[in-house]
Amino acid sequence: MTSTRSLIADLEGRLAEEAERLVEPADPARVARAIDAAHSASMGFEREPRGRWRAALPLLAAASLLLAVGFLVMMHSRPGPAAQPSPAADPVEQFVNAFDGVHTPDRLVAPLDGVQRLASLATPSGLATGAQAFWSDGVRLAEHLPIAQPIRLLRDAAAALRRAETSQPPVDPTPAPTGA
Amino acid sequence: MPRGATSSAIPLQERSDEELARSARAGAASAFEALVARFEPRLMAFFRSRGVDRPAAEDLFQETVLQMWRRFDHYDTTRPLAPWLFTIAARLMIKTRMRRQREEARERIVGARATPRADNPSPVDDIAGSDASLWRLASEVLSPESHTALWLRYAEDMAPQHIAAVLGKRPGAVRVLLHRARRTLAEALTHCQAPAPREGAAS
């Protein structure tokens, strides 16, 4: 036990001594590399990160306020059930309305966001109604549109509708004979 | 916030770590560089003492410097810098070690590494050439936490309360940890000094 204690006492001196020997002289190249790495990896946070964020806070607050106000305005501008009773509030109708004019080439760009959003909300029957509205020119133009998924859904729905329509038995164009 | 409160008349070399850190936080690139240069040998030795090879130690050093730069706003300038910096370094080392262990386990599962690679010497081998057999032994017989505590105590001359901050423990627990680490190391040393020394027999 005593020898262990003396060994421990000796150990403390040796630990410090050997640790000193492990410390190598400074390497300026290594220091320079580390500093370069820190600077290049932290672009935008070069100085006083806290100060920067603090300075950006009013801007963030203003942006949040604007967003909130914009959201409220949007909510109020939406036709409510009381203002415009049944058809306008119907998502299917909204969907069809959103496609109004999409098949006109010069108006392709503007309603795309709305189309995309509504297509994701639409029910299958809404999609089918939208497909009807989109029928001839729209399907062809859809091939060139940048929003793949909703347009693909719409195109498929249109194709399904077309198939369903062509598979129906032809209606006799001659008027039904009337009695007497 | 006492930002940039240090006198610029004092040469960088003569300023304390904390003064340099305050200046660096205020955006003084030269103060930051002086700090990095000051801590480079100490951090490299810290990593190397744990058996990290030189290239990996340099990576860890770079990562520590990057974290220091990014997290300066979290540093409390009223406290000593070294414990804060070594906390970053120690955590990075643990993270790296865990990642390496995961990779090794994955490699073993895939069977890509049936035999140990000759180009990847064990940590103990890596510092075997250095004149620090005691630290080599410590890296064998002590847990990473005990080893870190011992290094901070004897190489960095850090007080137990600061070591406690690095390890996330209470000062009393650190004292116990240090005591046990010393005892384990002393016992291992007596085994090693036995007539027929065996390689890696210290556990």
Image (spheres, coloured by chain):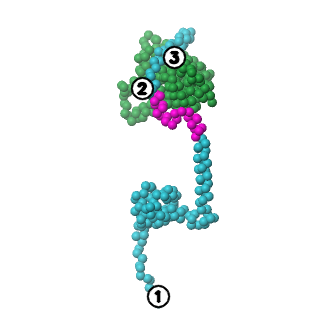
Chain colours: A cyan, B green
**In the image, residue A126 lies at what x, y percent?**
50, 63
Dot 1 amino acid type: Gly
Share a chain, discs 2 and 3? Answer: yes
Share a chain, discs 2 and 1? Answer: no
The structure residue drawn at horizontal position 46% and vertical position 33%, both measured from the top left corner, is: A40
Tag 2 subunit: B
Secondary element at image label 2: helix
Per the model, the C-alpha gap separating discs 3 and 1 is 115 Å
Q: How many marks?
A: 3
Residue beneath disc 2: B55
The structure residue drawn at horizontal position 41% and vertical position 65%, both measured from the top left corner, is: A137
Dot 2 amino acid type: Pro
Tag 1 subunit: A
Q: Sort mark 2 into few (<14), some (14-19) or many (20+) by Cα contacts within 10 Å.
A: few
- Residue B185's tag is 3
The residues colored magenta run A34-56
Per the model, the C-alpha gap separating discs 2 and 3 is 28 Å
Residue A38 lies in magenta, yes or no? yes
The structure residue drawn at horizontal position 61% and vertical position 42%, both measured from the top left corner, is: A58
**In the image, residue B20 lies at what x, y percent?**
55, 24
The structure residue drawn at horizontal position 46% and vertical position 25%, both measured from the top left corner, is: A31
Tag 3 subunit: B
- Residue B26's tag is none
Q: Nearer the viewer, residue A117 or B19?
A: B19
Residue beneath disc 1: A179
The answer to whether B147 is drawn above or below residue A112 in the figure is: above
**Left or right position of B8 against B55:** right
Whether residue B107 is visible: yes
